[in-house]
Image (tube, rainbow, N blue to C red):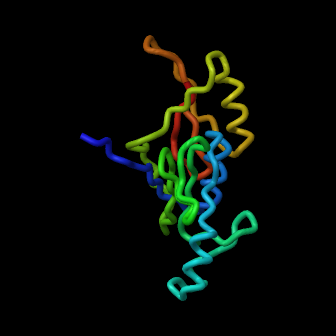
Amino acid sequence: MVPTHWKLVIDATDPHAQADFWAAALGYEVEDNSPLIEQLLTAGAVPEDVLTRHRDRRAWRTAAAVRHPDDPYDPTSGTGLGRRLLFNQVPEPKPAHKNRLHLDLHPESGRREEETTRLAELGAAVVRHVKEQGGEWTVMTDPEGNEFCVH
């Protein structure tokens, strides 16, 4: 069986701010879709109102993505072909209840406190510290309130 290609899609109020946060948090790259956008504009296939400007280039208004810097990508579209997170704009804010899915970040051993401080400087918030028989970690939220853990 050939492994299935996948990406994690996250609902967001501001997909570009989320992409910037998670790119900085993970050491990923924000995808640059401007080559594809320019081709589609030239061909008359997309209207200007579905676009915005982000990082001094054209981008999709309601979507942004980040990709692992070592993974392949399609240079004609800027789309990552490996590990990536896609942020889609939704009109409603995140519900108050706990996420059903979250990311666990694993910095180098002994660097959890340093990493939580760095992530807080990027806009994350510490929710609580957990220490139990199975391990120790910090529960945090990204700028839109999505929970994640730092081990």
What residue lies at 58% left-to-right and 52% top-to-bottom? Answer: 66
Q: Nearer the viewer, residue 143 or 35?
A: 35
Q: Position of residue 84 (x, y in %)?
A: 51, 48
What residue lies at 49% left-to-right and 44% top-to-bottom? Answer: 83
Quarter the C terminus occupies: top right
Q: Tell me: 42 left or right of 97.
A: right
Residue 103, above or below 33: above
Q: Position of residue 44 (x, y in %)?
A: 54, 88
What residue lies at 57% left-to-right and 71% top-to-bottom? Answer: 36
Q: Nearer the viewer, residue 70 or 15?
A: 70
Q: How many marks?
A: 0
Q: Position of residue 8 (x, y in %)?
A: 44, 49
Q: Position of residue 27 (x, y in %)?
A: 65, 40
What residue lies at 62% left-to-right and 70% top-to-bottom? Answer: 35
Q: Nearer the viewer, residue 18 or 27?
A: 27
Residue found at the very far top of the displayed protein: 133
**Which quarter of the figure has residue 111?**
top right
**Which quarter of the figure has residue 105?**
top right
Q: Tell me: 11 left or right of 127.
A: left
Quarter the N terminus occupies: top left
Residue found at the very far bottom of the displayed protein: 44
Residue 18, above or below 128: below
